[in-house]
Image: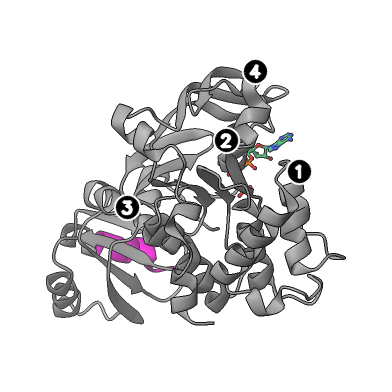
């Protein structure tokens, strides 16, 4: 389906309902101070502070087990905080959970579509939970199926849909109640690259329409593509926050040179290149040199006759930021 069809989605229909008011008063849609989640004695979310404003695309970046989903479940009012303050739209999830849930859309980590129903019925049945009228829901469903490029599958069962199509349908379902805030827990995990790009494209369009997006990911490219602001989480804590570019500027160098030497020689070689960068990391399979001058660094490696098996110059990424901040990789 063409991008024209997708862009035909009425901007008002996906725009947050109270965005103007929030912008004017700068009331954060999500406000957390010292937010804590414990499972028994285990601390999964360790006193984190957050403010998410209307129109932002806000991301939680971190490896498995960092506490991202636990945080999202508290924001989605399906898991009670163990401590701290949490306000969504200025409301208290403990008291106003049902009201808040009616104003947010949730894309969970695992798709929970009804495989027995058709694509369109999945949207309409879900919309009925919000008490929305059937005729209105039919129009809304068709509009959303256009948007997620599934209009031609509207009357098919969900069962034969690909993973990418199911994800797009889950996103459409989350938008059925015209939410002011869309929560997405690892929206593209398990999808092939083409399907991931299709999902990113739709999310990017929602962002352009002004929908506030809050997502978790352990993919740095996803965070870089979609998020205006990120918190980097590790072991329940926020270790850094800022825009992707800002984080890279603050915590990484402009260039990164990766060198591979024969097995067992990395430590020795690290000593011989230590002066060529701001920092040198020894990873199991390679040396990573952080430098402002990648070309000069590579030239010096060769001038010293070090002869790596391979040498690669690239721009710094959020993965480098994460490695620098935590000492381990985002994806093991
Ligand atoms: N219901 C639960 N009971 C006990 N421990 C839990 C529960 N839910 C999560 N945890 C633990 O809390 C920690 C954080 O989990 P969480 O799912 O929030 O992390 P995450 O960053 O979203 O990782 P993932 O990408 O794997 O979902 C993990 O160590 C996890 O095992």
Marks 1 and 4, Cα distance to the nearest angstrom? 20 Å
Q: Does any portion of residue 87 appear in the rendered image?
A: yes
Of labels 1 and 4, earlier in sequence is 4
Indicate the position of residue 145 as horizontal and vertical percent values. Answer: 62, 68
Q: Which numbered disc, 4 or 2, marks the residue closer to the eye?
A: 4
Above or below residue 31? Residue 124 is: below
Mark 2, other Cα within 10 Å: few <14 / some 14–19 / many ≥20: many
In percent of width and height, residue 80 lies at 67, 25
Number of callouts: 4
| Residue matched to label 4 | 95
Name the residue tied to disc 1. Answer: 129
Q: Quadrant of the N terminus?
A: bottom right
Q: Residues within 10 Å of mark 4 (few under 14, many from 20)?
A: few
Quadrant in which ligand 1 is drawn: top right
Helix, strand or loop under label 2: helix
Q: In this view, does 85 lie above or below 168?
A: above
Q: Which residue is drawn at 45% across and 53% down?
A: 12
**Tag 3's secondary structure?**
helix
Mark 4 or 3: the one toward you: 4
Of the two numbered discs 4 and 3 on the same chain, state the one appearing first in sequence.
4
Please report whichever mark, 3 or 2, sits nearer to the chain's N-terminal start: 2
Q: Does the magenta stretch include residue 271?
A: yes
Circle 2 sits on which residue? 71
Q: Does the residue labelled 2 lie within 8 Å of ligand 1?
A: yes
Instruction: Give the mark, 2 or 1, whose residue is nearer the N terminus.
Output: 2
Q: Give the range drawn in magenta.
A: 264-272
Between 286 and 49, the one lying in front of the other is 49
How packed mark 1 is, by other alpha carbons closer than 10 Å (few <14, some 14-19, many 20 or more), is: few
Q: Which mark is residue 244?
A: 3
Q: Where is residue 217 in the image (x, y as percent from the top left)?
A: 52, 53
């Amino acid at each position: 389906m063409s991008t024209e069809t997708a862009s035909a989605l009425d901007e008002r229909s996906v725009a947050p309902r109270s965005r103007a008011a929030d912008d004017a008063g700068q009331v954060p849609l999500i406000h957390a101070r010292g937010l804590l989640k414990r499972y028994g004695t285990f601390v999964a979310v360790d006193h984190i502070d957050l403010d998410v404003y209307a129109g932002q695309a806000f991301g939680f970046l971190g490896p498995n087990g960092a506490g991202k989903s636990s945080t999202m479940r508290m924001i989605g009012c399906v898991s009670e905080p163990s401590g701290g303050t949490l306000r969504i739209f200025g409301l208290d999830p403990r008291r106003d959970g049902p009201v808040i849930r009616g104003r947010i859309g949730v894309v969970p980590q695992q798709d929970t579509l009804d495989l027995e129903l058709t694509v369109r019925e999945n949207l309409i049945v879900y919309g009925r939970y919000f008490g929305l009228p059937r005729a209105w829901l039919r129009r809304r469903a068709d509009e959303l199926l256009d948007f997620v490029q599934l209009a031609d599958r509207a009357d098919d069962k969900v069962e034969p849909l690909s993973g990418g199509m199911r994800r797009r349908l889950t996103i459409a379902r989350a938008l059925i109640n015209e939410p002011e805030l869309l929560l997405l827990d690892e929206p593209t995990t398990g999808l092939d690259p083409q399907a991931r790009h299709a999902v990113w494209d739709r999310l990017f369009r929602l962002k352009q329409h002004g929908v506030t997006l809050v997502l978790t990911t352990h993919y740095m490219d996803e965070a870089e593509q979609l998020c205006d602001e990120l918190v980097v989480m590790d072991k329940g804590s926020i270790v850094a926050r800022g825009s992707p570019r800002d984080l890279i500027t603050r915590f990484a160098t402009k260039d990164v040179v990766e060198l591979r030497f024969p097995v067992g020689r990395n430590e020795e070689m690290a000593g011989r290149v230590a002066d060529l960068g701001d920092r040198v990391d020894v990873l199991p399979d390679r040396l990573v040199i952080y430098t402002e001058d990648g070309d000069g660094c590579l030239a010096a490696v060769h001038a010293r006759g070090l002869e790596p098996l391979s040498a690669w110059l690239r721009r710094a990424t959020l993965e480098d930021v994460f490695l620098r901040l935590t000492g381990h990789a985002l994806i093991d």
